[in-house]
């Protein structure tokens, strides 16, 4: 069985990261997998690092990178994916909005020769147990339309925070990533497509994080970064 790396970016997650790590470790250990769990902290201002450190004695497979400054989710995902050692490398959200048990439905795709498997909330078989407020859902639909128009990435749901790459795909994509914050998902999928990697979508169960507060300014920044990806593609920056 191939070794699995689970990369979890975290910012101010002291109240939730413990539950996610305990559940992730329990599931993977039960499956008899060879695995590591790598938490990459993005300049947290709370005790996220302390919570993770306190669990390391009970979870031998748990590692941590503790960045003292905030760089953005894209930055720490890239850092974690390149630091990971697994033959399959998954990144997932610290709030557990999509549980790690979905990895068992992802792995057969890698056996079939796929390089990247992307969790989707938009395809048949997906299940959203807690929905976003209607306005955020509307803005998400507008964003997906703009992404598909400007930077076709070949998937229905570029923003689901549950994506897995082979080690080979990781080293082809992530060193070229330039977006550190909002639209990094779009960029890594555009890069994977540009590299000719085989990408598949798999349905996931997802619950909205009711504590998440994405501001309108964040949506604007995300769109500006999508435009930057488009310009990078036109300008040959990813060569």
Image (spheres, helix red, strand yellow):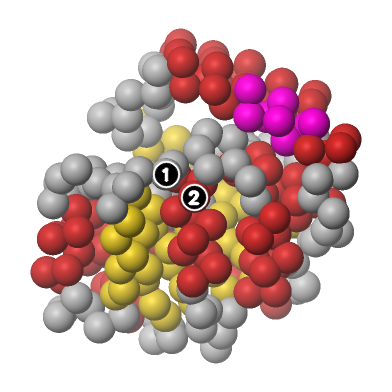
Q: Who's the residue at 42% across and 80% down the image?
A: 35
Q: Secondary structure at mark 1?
A: loop
Left or right, 237 with respect to 21, comes to: right
Question: Quadrant of the image for the N terminus?
Answer: bottom right
Q: On the image, which quarter does residue 123 sit in?
A: top right
Q: Who's the residue at 67% across and 69% down the image?
A: 171
Q: Position of residue 68 (x, y in %)?
A: 28, 53
Res 71 label: 1
Left or right, 79 with respect to 157, comes to: left
Relative to 32, say whether 235 is above or below. Answer: above
Relative to 122, say whether 114 is above or below. Answer: below
Front residue (pair 214, 68): 68
Q: Secondary structure at mark 2?
A: helix
Query: Pointer 2 and pointer 1: residues touching (CB < 8 Å)?
Result: yes
Using the rendered image of the protein, determine whether residue 95 is visible from the camera's viewpoint: no
Front residue (pair 97, 214): 214
Left or right, 218 with respect to 15, comes to: right
Report the span colored magenta: 224-231
From the image, give the main secondary structure of the stretch colored magenta.
helix
Res 32 label: none
Question: Quadrant of the image for the C terminus?
Answer: bottom right
């Amino acid at each position: 069985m191939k070794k699995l790396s689970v990369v979890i970016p975290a910012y101010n997650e002291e109240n939730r990261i413990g539950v996610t790590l305990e559940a992730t470790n329990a599931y993977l250990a039960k499956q008899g997998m060879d695995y590591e769990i790598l938490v990459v902290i993005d300049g947290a201002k709370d005790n996220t690092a302390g919570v993770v450190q306190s669990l390391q004695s009970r979870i031998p497979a748990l590692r941590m990178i503790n960045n003292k400054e905030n760089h953005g989710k894209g930055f720490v995902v890239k850092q974690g994916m390149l630091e990971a050692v697994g033959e399959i490398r998954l990144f997932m959200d610290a709030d557990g909005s999509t549980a790690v048990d979905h990895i068992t439905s992802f792995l057969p795709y890698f056996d079939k020769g796929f390089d990247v498997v992307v969790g989707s909330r938009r395809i048949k078989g997906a299940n959203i147990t807690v929905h976003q407020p209607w306005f955020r859902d509307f803005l998400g639909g507008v964003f997906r339309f703009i992404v598909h128009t400007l930077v076709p990435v070949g998937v229905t749901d570029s923003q689901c925070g549950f994506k897995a790459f082979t080690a080979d795909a990781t080293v082809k994509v992530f060193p070229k990533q330039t977006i550190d914050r909002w639209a990094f998902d779009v960029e890594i999928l555009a890069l994977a497509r540009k590299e000719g990697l085989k990408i598949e979508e798999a349905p996931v169960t997802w619950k909205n994080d009711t504590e998440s507060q994405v501001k309108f300014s964040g949506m604007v920044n995300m769109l500006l970064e999508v435009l930057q990806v488009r310009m990078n593609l036109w300008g040959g920056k990813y060569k």
